[in-house]
Image (cartoon, rainbow, N blue to C red):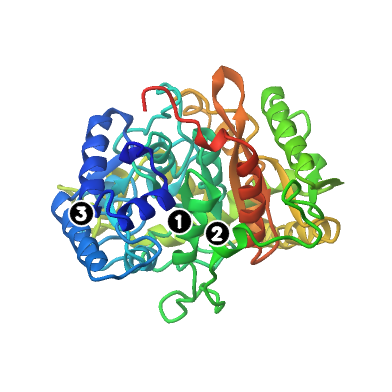
Amino acid sequence: MKALHELGVAELVAAIADKKTSAVEAAQHLLARARQHASLGAYLAFNDDATLAQAKAADTRLAAGERTPLLGVPLAHKDIFVTRDFPTTAGSNMLAGYQSPFDATVVAQLAAAGAVTLGKLNCDEFAMGSGNDNSAFGPAHNPWDSSRVPGGSSGGSAAAVAARLVPAATGTDTGGSIRQPAAFCGITGIKPTYGRCSRYGMVAFASSLDQAGPMARSAADCAVLLSAMVGPDIDRDSTSLDHPAEDYTAALTRPRAGATAAQPLKGLRVGLPTEFFGAGCAPDVLATVRSALAECEKLGATLVDISLPRTELSIPVYYVIAPAEASSNLSRFDGVKFGHRAAQYDDLIDMYKKSRSEGFGPEVQRRIMIGTYVLSHGYYDAYYLQAQKIRRLIAQDFQQAFTQCDVIAGPVAPTVAWKIGEKSADPMANYLADIYTLSTSLAGLPGMSVPAGFGAAHMPVGLQLVGNYFKEGELLHTAHAFQQATDWHTRAPQGF
């Protein structure tokens, strides 16, 4: 048998069920491995007692003959999900030491499916960033090159999965924060349709955009996790969709009409937006994505040229709407009820100012200021209202495109992962890195990143797949067929 850390989710489920290992052994092995590679900066918190208690409970359930899709499998959660047994900081000094009295719905659903929580994973502060170098507790590092970013904001999740510190992890995607780090670290990640996963217990950044999703090594493993994560939670989350949960593992091998074993994607129309393949994308990324698309053609897919004409507008639209919502959501952190409170202050207003200045990092402060400005009297109509109107037009562009194709494909990011700190002094350069992912989030569509090869400096490149609403199964089927024909998703960084 492979070493425990080399096993994916489905492989671990089988190994534990067949008594080749136990949930306790798997948890102990991965806890030790996470500490061995602590310099990667992927983890922010552990609670060995809680983890091993969960593992023992899973073994007891297994001994009693119980079987669930994730029973005994160790997972880790992005530190944006509140957890009863682990501290939750959202990567910010504002929440340093905060312990939630309850679990987020996503965490509770995965636990009900049998998952064992290993710990909490590093992220950009309040999920604001593209490189995981905005975390108040230090950056996470890309295991393919520790001098480079793992992507953000779910960088700790991507780094931990890529480095074989955990078989799978949760992430959140507001403007690309599952797909971009998955691409940068050579793993698979999927953001479902907005509202498919409950936001209850997820520390809010931008409420109309934030969405939870799984990150793992393969589409098959993501399907197992996503099946456990989706479902209505309308009593606790007003943005939750009243749409039943699905078994996405069934979609992986469900044959398409007219498809064959040699051509499982026969009949699939893959749309290629001209805006995704222009001069703004690095040649090495374009070449890798084109090669992946050629493989899709071999598997029977038909490539169709399409247009998403308002792609460039997604950056200004997103950076009006998201900061506006962040300004509102983060107003609760004032040093009164919970969160950081300044040690010394003169009066209430001084306490607010000092507590927020000390608790929030530069990028969070920047976005709060932008958001407060665009929502202020005299500017609301000129900025926020206009941005919402263009957002609707962006969504309409996608619906027009889906009359010509079934799935949209292209690069996830215009370059491979950059050096840590390289873009810290230039926020606009960071914002531009999200050009290919923002429009999908603004439209609320499902999207995923699939390992497609390597670009400059032998850094991973991801192929982005975007589907229409509730078409996660089609995305996972497409990705699975691609992964059955390629081995990019099996590659591990040297030393891990």
CA gap, disc 1 and disc 2: 8 Å
* Figure disc tally: 3
User: Is there a contact, CB below 8 Å, between mark 1 and mark 3?
Assistant: no
First in sequence: mark 3 or mark 2? 3
**Residue at horizontal 62 percent and vertical 36 percent from the top:** 486
As shown in the figure, which amino acid type bears the numbered disc 1? Answer: Phe
User: Toward which corner of the image does residue 470 lie, by quadrant?
Assistant: bottom right
Residue 358 vs residue 237, the one in the foreground: 237
The tag on residue 51 is: 3
- 43 with respect to 491 (left or right): left
Q: Quadrant of residue 429?
A: top right
Q: Which label number is shown at residue 209?
A: 2
* CB within 8 Å, label 1 to label 2: yes
Q: Which sits in the foreground, 282 or 144?
A: 144
Hey, what amino acid is under mark 2?
A: Leu
Residue at position x 40%, y 69% in the image: 200
Q: Is there CB contact under 8 Å for labels 3 and 2?
A: no
Circle 2 crowding by C-alpha within 10 Å: few under 14, some 14–19, many from 20: many
Question: What residue would you read off at disc 1?
Answer: 205
In front: mark 1 or mark 3? 3
Q: Is residue 70 above or below residue 102?
A: above
| Between discs 1 and 3, the one toward the N terminus | 3
Q: Secondary structure at mark 3?
A: helix
Relative horizontal placement of residue 152, taking residue 67 as reference (left or right): right
Relative placement, left or right, of 471 versus 90 is right
